[in-house]
Amino acid sequence: MNTTFAPRGLATFALALPLAVQAAEPQSDSPTEMLSLNPVVVTAALAPRTADQSLASVTVLDEATLRRQDPTSVTDLLRGQPGVDITTQGSFGKQSSLFLRGTGSNANVLLIDGIRLRSATSGAASWEFFDPRMFESAEIVRGPRGSLYGADAVGGVIQLFTPEGEEGAPQPRVSVGGGAFNTQRYSASLTGSSGGTRYYLAGSHIDTDGDPVREGGDDRGYDNTSGLVRLSHTLENDAQVGLLALRSRGSTEFDAPGAATDDFVQQVVGVYAELAVTGSWRSRLTLSEARDERDTLAPTYTSLFETRARTAQWQNTLALGPHELVAGAEYAEDDLGDSQTSGLAFDEERRYNRAVFAQGFLDFHPLTTQLSLRHDDNQSFGGELTGSLALGYALDERHVARASYGTAFRAPTFNELYFPFAGSSNPDLSSETSSTVELGLRGQYGSWFWDLATYQTEVDDLIALDETFRPVNVNEARIRSAELALGAEIDDWTLAAALTWMDPESRSGDNAGKRLARRSTESLRLDVDRKLGDWSLGGSWIAQNHRYNDSANQQRLPGYGIVNLRAGWDFAPLWSLRATLENALDKEVVTAQGADFDPVTFQAMPFDYINAGRAAFVSVHFGQ
């Protein structure tokens, strides 16, 4: 079923919402409300800043949001957020791509507690394999961050945070639930502190028969078991050491065509030590390893990839009155593992990257300035220099205007450089480079906020496939957009809205003037929740217009609008019941196409990847 997307009506609604909220707003500036609506973020500037001080377009999904929505996947949590577009090849652990400000999955960065996780072969993160119950919050920073995070931070950075561990006696938390498609979900955690040591231990499991990923297909199942350990200890001299270990392991079924299975492992391990060298200088050393493993068994092929990314980072933060300087160095190594195991012998199986970076944050209230610079030296593609400049001006106590310019680059992946099939790689590739100009304005009030941003990104040397399917640096792209984010907490109501308009356009070659593949241009997300004593009720409406599956804009995929409903009941001290009804109106959602090959006609036969229809889930929770 096709869903008509009405951009003018949605835009009118979104622009009218601030006026309605303002009319209903009680005059309150309580610290709790201000912290919730103007949260502290660390991803935008490598240091704690409130959202209005960050000089960036940021969205924070806090613990309360994650608990209310209780999604089965991180992709469900991120879908429709400002500047975020998700495409999937089915539901429940099926391959997903995240487009951040129109840039692809390999042009944005995923961090878990500061540790980067991606596949070194494809360059993209496996977003579909992360259980939201393992995380406490998420930060979405939109715009180039290459000068802070290096390669691939073209569209922005998304960071998932695990719980740090609460002070006091041990506190357990347990949840058990299930629902449609014979889905079962379990999770448990224990948090506390003792003698200067804080700890958080958690585990989760999901198992589902799944649903078909194409019309007339069989159910494609999914299971995922995750474990998390986070420890930190504060010494007498205020130094701190810590450990993070997160591992997800499971399997997902897909069409290849025919039944096929991916066994996967996603793992992050990191240790750190932080020392207050002086009263104004803190130094932190982090050592980490991220693993992305994929063992594929299909009717016509098998493959095994085990990629690892090891990083050592030294970061120093120096406070100079109201100003702050951050400087550091980083050494990273990508490792494809043993070619004897994978069966594919890449010309290069390891590469290192050395980088130095610095950032200055200068506060001359009402004017603030953020200037950053980074140089990367990569074994495969040479050196890249990126930088950014952001200016913020407090118009008054509630309104801050900002302007920024930043550069970034996307590094060629191992697949693009060295994939071992003849003619399918190009070791002479250069990095994609980009420049972005952005203007923004934020209004921050006692019970609500709004944030409006507009930007233009120019991408040069875009890596694309030529007529022989060999990657080459030929394309250019231009992405223009406007984003509006709103949030409010009024009495027992919690409201959030995101409206995105975007024009992602190819600027060269045969597809000049065409929309970049699989990007929608109009998106709306509206979240409404209400507390009613021991009960809570809420829902989300997510709508997007059509997109094209191909660069030539010949394969049109319809827009959609889905409604997700939720309810909670605190029926006893520490006990609660939660229910969700996903896609309540049973709409068809198609964001990507696949193709079968006809051996008789030698033609590709496209088919739609479909997402799950209406699905109900119920769970019982114990703990705070």
Image (cartoon, rainbow, N blue to C red):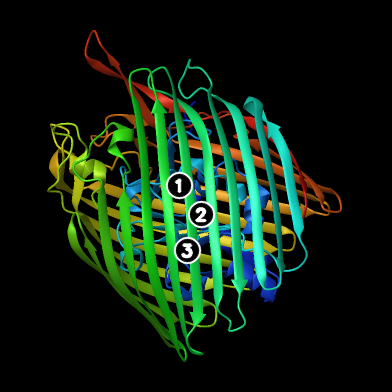
In the rendering, at what x and y percent does residue 271 appear?
49, 63
In the rendering, at what x and y percent does residue 212 appear?
51, 22
Position of the C terminus by quadrant: bottom right
Label 2 Cα crowd, 10 Å radius (few <14 / some 14-19 / many 20+): many
How many angstroms separate mark 2 from mark 1 (CA)? 8 Å
User: What kind of element bears circle 2?
Assistant: strand
How many angstroms separate mark 3 from mark 1 (CA)? 17 Å
Residue 365 appears in the figure? no
- Residue at horizontal 48 percent and vertical 60 percent from the top: 270
Q: Is residue 366 above or below residue 474?
A: below
For residue 498, the mark is: 2
For residue 523, the mark is: 1
Amino acid type, callout 3: Val
**207 with respect to 297 (left or right):** right
In the rendering, at what x and y percent does residue 121 appear?
30, 43
Q: Looking at this view, is 445 or 372 the one in front?
A: 372
User: What kind of element bears circle 1?
Assistant: strand
Evaluate if marks 2 and 1 touch, with contact meaning CB atoms under 8 Å apart.
yes
Residue 414 appears in the figure? yes
In the rendering, at what x and y percent does residue 217 appear?
48, 17
Q: N-terminal of the two: label 3 or label 1?
A: 3
For residue 235, the mark is: none
Amino acid type, callout 2: Ala
Amino acid type, callout 1: Ser
- Residue at horizontal 71 percent and vertical 67 percent from the top: 193
Q: How many marks?
A: 3
Q: N-terminal of the two: label 2 or label 1?
A: 2
How many angstroms separate mark 2 from mark 3 (CA)? 12 Å
Label 3 Cα crowd, 10 Å radius (few <14 / some 14-19 / many 20+): many
